[in-house]
Image (tube, rainbow, N blue to C red):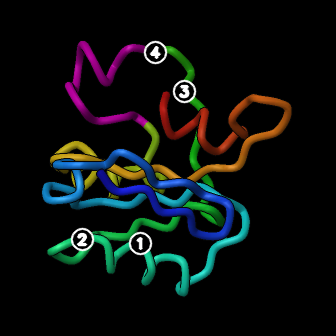
Amino acid sequence: MIAIKIKGVCLANLGTIIKRMKTLVDLRNEQNDDFYEKVENLFDKPLEVIRLGDQAIRACTGCWNCWLKTPGRCVFKDQMTEFYPKYVNSDAVILLMNTAQGFINHRAKAFFD
């Protein structure tokens, strides 16, 4: 069992996931490379770090084109167009996001949609 806390973030009970981890997606407003380096040291292979904190991600409009007309591809050509294949093809993903009053921020919501 691994239980590590870095700058208030607890990485506990990661077990076998650590060996398969490939991608870290950072949706936070404040990002720093020192934190990524500490997290990457936990793994036996390099992580793909995707920084979306300062990128504009369009909110889903519910058109369903990504399901029906062009599976897996959104009609909006934003930063997710480049990063979505890396996210989908990862064995496992670490998500870093801001929260306020128990809810995720708008950028994280747009990412999940």
Which kind of residue does numbered mark 3 sit on?
A: Cys
Q: Residue at x 46, y 54 (%)?
A: 11
Q: Is residue 73 above or below residue 57?
A: above
In the displayed structure, does residue 19 sit left or right of residue 68? left
Which label's residue is closer to the chain start, 2 or 4?
Answer: 2
Q: CA distance from mark 3 to mark 4?
A: 8 Å
Residue mark closest to the camera, 1 vs 3: 1
Q: Is residue 29 above or below residue 37?
A: above
Which label's residue is closer to the chain start, 2 or 3?
Answer: 2
Residue mark closest to the camera, 2 vs 4: 2
Q: Position of residue 10 (x, y in %)?
A: 55, 54
**Label 2 belongs to which residue?**
43
Are discs 2 and 1 less than 8 Å apart at CB? yes
Q: Residue at x 41, y 72 (%)?
A: 39
Which label's residue is closer to the chain start, 1 or 3?
Answer: 1
- Nearer to the camera, 100 or 1: 1
Q: Is residue 23 above or below residue 34?
A: above
Q: CA distance from mark 4 to mark 1?
A: 37 Å
**Label 1 belongs to which residue?**
39
The stretch of residues the image draws in magenta is 64-75
* Disc number placed over residue 60 in the picture, else none: 3
Q: Is residue 13 above or below residue 102?
A: below
Which kind of residue does numbered mark 2 sit on?
A: Phe
Residue mark closest to the camera, 3 vs 4: 3
Q: CA distance from mark 2 to mark 3?
A: 33 Å
**Label 4 belongs to which residue?**
63
Please check the rendered image and state whether residue 25 is part of the magenta-colored stretch, yes or no: no
Q: CA distance from mark 1 to mark 3?
A: 31 Å
